[in-house]
Image (tube, rainbow, N blue to C red):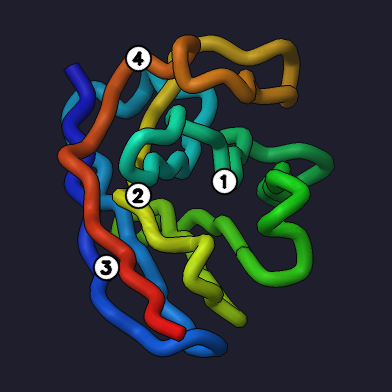
Amino acid sequence: QVRLVESGGGSVQAGGSLNLSCAVSGSAGSVKCMGWFRQAPEKEREAVATIYDGFIGGRYADGRYADSAKGRVIISHDKVKNTVNLQLNSLNPEDTATYYCAAASISHGSICPWSWTLFDYWGQGTQVTVSS
């Protein structure tokens, strides 16, 4: 069993930044990929960013980002703290949602799944609210 606990959400004005953190514990050795997803009221859950939980060419893999996140969002590992972080920059009201951390036990090589249905473990979510 893998346990995920998110933190770092809050309320900011448009243009602001937030750093979300996901603490990973439990049977983390089974995890192949980590991801951040979000869900706004009356909207479907969508991927924000995913990252392979391993080395490629001697370094950690780069993240994969939704088009709406490219250039504004950075997903990263902190293996000392056992966290996966999501740096959100240049936030706008359309980013308002509950943000969830998730872990997947599958990957296609270093390619992570993108659909939330393929992630096995979920945190409780953290709210991000962006005002104009």
Tell me the amino acid under the disc marked 3: Gly
The residue beneath circle 4 is 120
Q: Earlier in the sequence, mark 3 or mark 4?
A: 3
Q: How far from the left and from the top, in percent, is residue 131?
A: 38, 81
Q: Neighbour class for label 3 at 10 Å: few (<14), some, many (≥20)?
A: some
Whole-angstrom CA distance, mark 4 to mark 2, is 16 Å
Q: Are marks 3 and 2 in contact (CB under 8 Å)?
A: yes
Where disc 1 sits, the SS reads strand
Q: Are marks 1 and 3 in contact (CB under 8 Å)?
A: no
Tell me the amino acid under the disc marked 2: Tyr
Where disc 3 sits, the SS reads loop
Residue that appears at 62% across and 19% down: 113
Disc 3 or disc 4, which is closer to the eye?
3
Tell me the amino acid under the disc marked 4: Asp
Checking the image for residue 9, the label placed there is 3
Where disc 2 sits, the SS reads strand
Whole-angstrom CA distance, mark 2 to mark 1, is 9 Å
Q: Quadrant of residue 15?
A: bottom right
Whole-angstrom CA distance, mark 1 to mark 3, is 15 Å
Whole-angstrom CA distance, mark 3 to mark 2, is 8 Å
Disc 4 or disc 1, which is closer to the eye?
1
Query: Which of the two residues, 44 or 27, is positioned nearer the viewer here?
Result: 44
Q: Earlier in the sequence, mark 1 or mark 3?
A: 3
The residue beneath circle 2 is 99
